[in-house]
Image: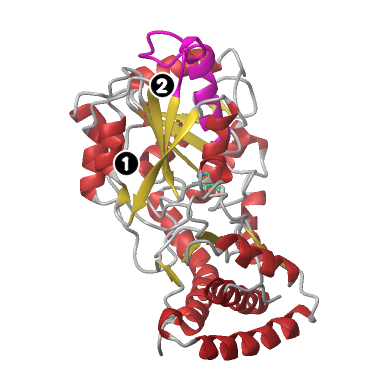
């Protein structure tokens, strides 16, 4: 089948006529479908709801002599620190187990950097004339929003299938006002790329000009395969230590997409020196986090091995949805030269790169037909995709029948948007 660019104007008009009819039929179904955010489905929440009753007896709240019902242990219950060390491959003493969500820890870290400075900061960031932060894009909108909210200048770094473009990163970190970078090393949000070993090595060996440059290593999808076996990842904390900059990285993770989003437990991991420094600062903020929830999670999830078994059951629910999305994309969009995408093995998203200049219009057409997706541009700093190309699809939440409908609307809309571009017309 010829790509759109090889077809005659007449052929494109015929294709448009057929698609406009299909679009109108879909529009008349009065759909109300949401593929905008990466939330687990009700089935997945039900799958883990046994966790609600793992603690029934007050005696169970006492673990290794620690009473999880009381104040204390700001860095988390020892068993929770051991759990996260096992999952992340670091030492328990390098972990700080926080509250319900990792974004809160990320925001806190940036906020403490701003008001007080990080461990190796010559002065608090608020006293610096200018702060810049690197944002590999497409990336996670909420990361970018944290650094934007402090007035930092966000600098886009292109993503490649092996991670951020490291030639560009290595060059940009020569600027002392560049204080950090956002990273999602495994099944990145939104493209589902996993950083190569070489990329990870280059991160560990970065030589930034700023002594307090921070790698925000958000390992949000560290055990989130929906296809194939668990893919091991390297311990960035020891790699940075070996390269002589032990304080350069903070790693984050949570159980948001293992148990309950917003009601899970989170972790921040870094050098012991960094953890001690942050613990002191955080002690001005809270006496301790919810250790009953920490204990509930440790009892339920046990260790990495057991958590990976549970993730296989999540995968049984997730995989058919991703397969359906990829099948419809393949059937409706291949060989037209108007979109491409990556087939991830884990994470929560599929990211479609539409023909430049058509992402916004595609989403506009989807919205008119009752299908909501993540806003065009959201995966770039300041919400602006310079190519107007990337669209994030989050297949996890809707039931499979709804997902199928939504994908038909999506592909029809994307094709119409591309045809409008080729024909120089507004069709709908
Ligand atoms: N980090 C990434 C890369 C995410 O995609 C998400 C949620 O979609 C989060 C963090 C949110 O994690 P939490 O619920 O622990 O704040």
Residue 73 at x, y percent in the picture: 53, 22
Q: Residues within 10 Å of mark 2 (few under 14, many from 20)?
A: many
Q: Is residue 178 above or below residue 364?
A: above
Residue located at (34% from left, 65% from top) = 229
For the residue pair 323 and 369, the one nearer the viewer reads as 369
Mark 2 / mark 1, whichever is N-terminal: 1
Residue 371 at x, y percent in the picture: 70, 68
The secondary element bearing badge 2 is classed as helix
Q: Does the magenta-highlighted stretch encompass residue 125? A: yes
For the residue pair 246 and 74, the one nearer the viewer reads as 246
Quadrant in which the N terminus is drawn: bottom left
Residue 190 at x, y percent in the picture: 48, 55
Q: Quadrant of residue 135?
A: top left
The secondary element bearing badge 1 is classed as loop
On screen, residue 416 versus residue 181, left or right, reads right
On screen, residue 360 versus residue 344, left or right, reads right
Q: Quadrant of residue 373?
A: bottom right
For the residue pair 53 and 231, the one nearer the viewer reads as 231
Q: Does the magenta-highlighted stretch encompass residue 385? A: no
How many numbered marks, from 0 up? 2
Which mark identifies residue 275? 2
Residue located at (26% from left, 33% from top) = 171
Q: Is residue 400 above or below residue 89?
A: below
According to the picture, the residue beneath numbered tag 1 turns out to be: 89
Quadrant in which the C terminus is drawn: bottom right
On screen, residue 14 versus residue 246, left or right, reads right
Residue located at (54% from left, 13% from top) = 115
Ligand 1 in which quarter: top right
Give the CA distance from mark 2 to mark 1: 16 Å
**What are the residue bounds of the magenta stretch?**
103-131
Please say whether residue 269 is visible from this viewpoint: yes
Residue 404 at x, y percent in the picture: 62, 79
């Amino acid at each position: 089948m010829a790509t759109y660019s090889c077809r005659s104007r007449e052929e494109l008009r015929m294709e448009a006529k057929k698609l406009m009819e299909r679009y109108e039929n879909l529009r008349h179904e009065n759909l109300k479908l949401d593929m905008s955010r990466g939330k687990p489905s009700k089935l997945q929440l039900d799958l883990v709801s046994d966790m609600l009753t793992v603690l029934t007896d007050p005696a169970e709240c006492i673990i290794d002599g620690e009473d999880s019902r009381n104040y204390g242990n700001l860095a988390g219950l020892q068993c929770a620190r051991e759990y996260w060390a096992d999952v992340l491959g670091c030492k328990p003493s390098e972990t700080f187990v926080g509250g319900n969500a990792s974004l809160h820890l990320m925001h806190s870290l940036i906020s403490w950097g701003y008001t007080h400075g990080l461990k190796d900061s010559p002065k608090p960031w608020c006293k610096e004339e200018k702060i810049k932060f690197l944002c590999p894009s497409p990336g996670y909108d909420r990361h970018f929003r944290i650094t934007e909210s402090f007035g930092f200048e966000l600098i886009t770094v292109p993503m490649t299938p092996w991670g951020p473009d490291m030639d560009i990163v290595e060059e940009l970190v020569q600027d002392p006002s560049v204080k950090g970078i956002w990273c999602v090393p495994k099944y990145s949000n939104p493209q589902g790329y996993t950083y190569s070993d070489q990329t990870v090595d280059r991160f560990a060996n970065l030589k930034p000009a700023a002594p307090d440059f921070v790698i925000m290593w958000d390992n949000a999808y560290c055990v989130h395969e929906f296809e194939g076996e668990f893919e091991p990842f390297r311990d960035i904390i020891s790699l940075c230590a070996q390269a002589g900059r032990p304080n350069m990285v903070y790693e984050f993770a949570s159980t948001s997409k293992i148990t309950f989003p917003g009601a899970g437990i989170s972790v921040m991991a870094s050098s012991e020196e960094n953890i001690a420094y942050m613990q002191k600062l955080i002690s001005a903020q809270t006496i301790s986090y919810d250790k009953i929830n920490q204990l509930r999670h440790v009892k339920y999830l046990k260790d990495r091995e057991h958590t990976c078994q549970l993730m296989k059951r999540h995968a049984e629910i997730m995989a058919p949805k991703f397969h359906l999305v990829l099948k419809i994309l393949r059937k409706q969009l291949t060989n037209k030269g108007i979109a491409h995408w990556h087939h991830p093995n884990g994470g929560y998203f599929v990211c479609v790169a539409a023909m430049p200049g058509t992402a916004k219009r595609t989403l506009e057409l989807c919205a008119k037909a009752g299908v909501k997706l993540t806003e065009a541009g959201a995966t770039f700093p300041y919400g602006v995709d310079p190519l107007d190309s990337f669209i994030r699809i989050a297949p996890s939440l809707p039931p499979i029948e709804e997902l199928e409908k939504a994908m038909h609307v999506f592909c029809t809309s994307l094709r119409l948007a591309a045809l409008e571009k080729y024909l120089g017309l507004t069709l709908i």
